[in-house]
Amino acid sequence: MVRMTDEPARWSRATTYPDMWVDPDDDPRNNDGVSPDGELGTLLDFLTNYRITLRMKCEGLDAEQLARRSVPPSTMSLLGLVRHLAEVERDWRNWITEGEPLPKLYGDPDGDFLGAVAEQSVVDAAYADLEREQAATDAALARHPDLGERLGKEGFAVRELLVHRIEEYARHCGHADLLRECVDGRVGQ
């Protein structure tokens, strides 16, 4: 007996390796086999690749699909993840400054997810917020190339902040894998 479900069929754009998101020649991440020199270069390369991965998991979706809360009762959506990571980038910048913290982008503690509604203007603003906050945090940390330097009121090491950023993106890219599969069935690395 065949059962009809609302679950989308699993699929991938890759043809060379059908379990991958895209074929290696189409992958925009650093996959040429040459790793960067040094610890700082390696950390920044991982961060960049996870940022690209998040964007890849969101590509090709409309505002409704990006805002879809695919795993009830969770408020998490792909759009919410984009907004959350913009908020987190701002928060990390607050960790390394001595002054007053910048206000939250989305208000309430869960405003990043709750405000992720299916409107193109919200999608556009989320991507703009993420790019701006990433650039500002990157610039703030670039002024401190010594990975052992301690910053801010709590004295976080630059290395710790970079590793924490990688961890945050990696964790949420895992969420994005599952969310995307629930939205349209696309799977892969």
Image: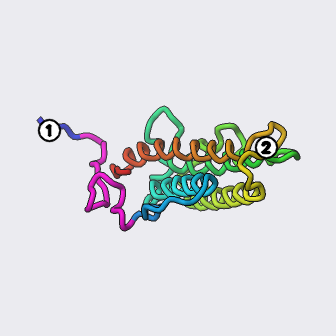
Count of residue discs: 2
Q: Which residues are magenta?
A: 5-26
Nearer to us: label 2 or label 1? 2
Question: Is 27 rendered above or below residue 187?
Answer: below
Mark 2 residue crowding within 10 angstroms, few (<14) / some (14–19) / many (20+): some
Q: Say whether residue 101 is left or right of residue 166.
A: right
Residue 25 on the magenta segment: yes
Quickly name the residue at label 1: 2
> Could you tell me which quadrant the N terminus lies in?
top left
Q: Amino acid at mark 1?
A: Val
Q: Quadrant of residue 59?
A: bottom left
Q: Which mark is residue 158?
A: none
Residue 173 falls inside the magenta stretch = no
Of the residues shown, which amino acid type is indicated by label 2? Arg
* Rendering coords of residue 84 (x, y %): 61, 46
User: What residue occupies the far left of the structure in this picture?
Assistant: 1
Q: Which residue is mark 2?
A: 150
- Between the residue at mark 2 and the residue at mark 1, the CA separation in whole angstroms equals 61 Å
Q: Regarding mark 2 in the picture, which secondary structure is present there? A: strand
Residue name at image x 54 percent, y 50 percent: 79
Question: Residue 143: where, in percent of width, then height?
Answer: 78, 58
Q: Say if 104 sits above or below 57 in the image.
A: above
